Amino acid sequence: MLMKILPKNFYKKDPTIVAKKLLGKFLVRFLNSKTLIGKIVETEAYYSKDDPAFRKDFLSKIIKYTLGTAFIYMVHANWLLNIIAYKEIFGGVLIRSIEPIKGIEEMMKNRGIKDISKLTNGPGKLTKALKITKDLNGIDVSKKGSKLIICSYKKENFEIKSSHRIGVKKDLEKKLRFFIKGNAFISK
DNA sequence: AGGAAGATCTACT
DNA sequence: GTAGATCTTCCTA
């Protein structure tokens, strides 16, 4: 497969723009000798300012991260994967679900289930399937050689739908969740 | 020690 | 589809 790593300046934009542009891109995880790949099909944008869903105690942490690095944290017994993105306002993009492309059996093993439709259709599920934990916190997904990278593959045509974010107690008026219309691996 | 957190699973109507 | 229990780490005291 011919894939190109997304460069650092890909993330130097408003998180909403980055969230939309990440749809259809490939999340690649190098695990031991195996390569696990999933296509990003659902994302959410978060801001560190004027965003009620953003946890204030996170700011002191993520401010240390640079563009295009992974910010991973635990919520309700699940690791959630964010990519740092910002232009003027500091923010990030939460990867909510991916479509399994390669290494599917390995993902099933990591998840302990055989049903592919439930393998990676949720933020906590995909981290488990790809064995993403705190160990990878701060990893640079725009750098060659990282154990976790994000690539572009080929151009695809799809329609982007948006909605309010999921699970947040207080959301903004703006719709900050984006997903590929009709994809079977969207979380509920 | 206690509470909170951007979730998931299971078991129902 | 909704409802409720329970999952694990981190922060505050």
Image (tube, coloured by chain):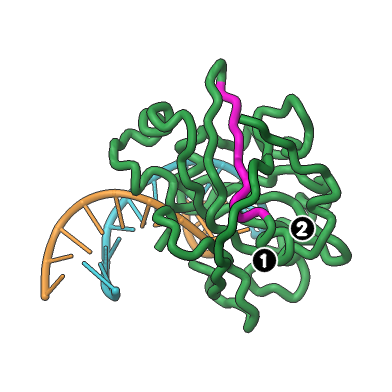
Chain colours: A green, B orange, C cyan
**Residue bearing the label numbered 2:** A59
The magenta segment is: A22-31
- Mark 1, Cα crowd under 10 Å, few <14 / some 14-19 / many 20+, is some
**Residue bearing the label numbered 1:** A54
Q: Chain of mark 1?
A: A
Q: Which residue is rendered at x = 42% and y = 32% of the image? A: A104
Judged left or right of residue A168, residue A139 is right
Q: Which residue is rendered at x = 53% and y = 54% of the image? A: A41
Res A45 label: none
Nearer to us in this view, A99 or A56: A99
**As shown in the figure, which amino acid type bears the numbered disc 2?**
Leu
SS at circle 2: helix
**As shown in the figure, which amino acid type bears the numbered disc 1?**
Phe
Please tell me whether residue A30 is drawn above or below residue A60 in the rendered image. above
Mark found first going from the N terminus, 1 or 2:
1
Residue A160 picture location, percent across and down: 57, 67
Q: Is label 1 in contact with label 2 (beta carbons under 8 Å)?
A: yes
- Mark 2, Cα crowd under 10 Å, few <14 / some 14-19 / many 20+, is some
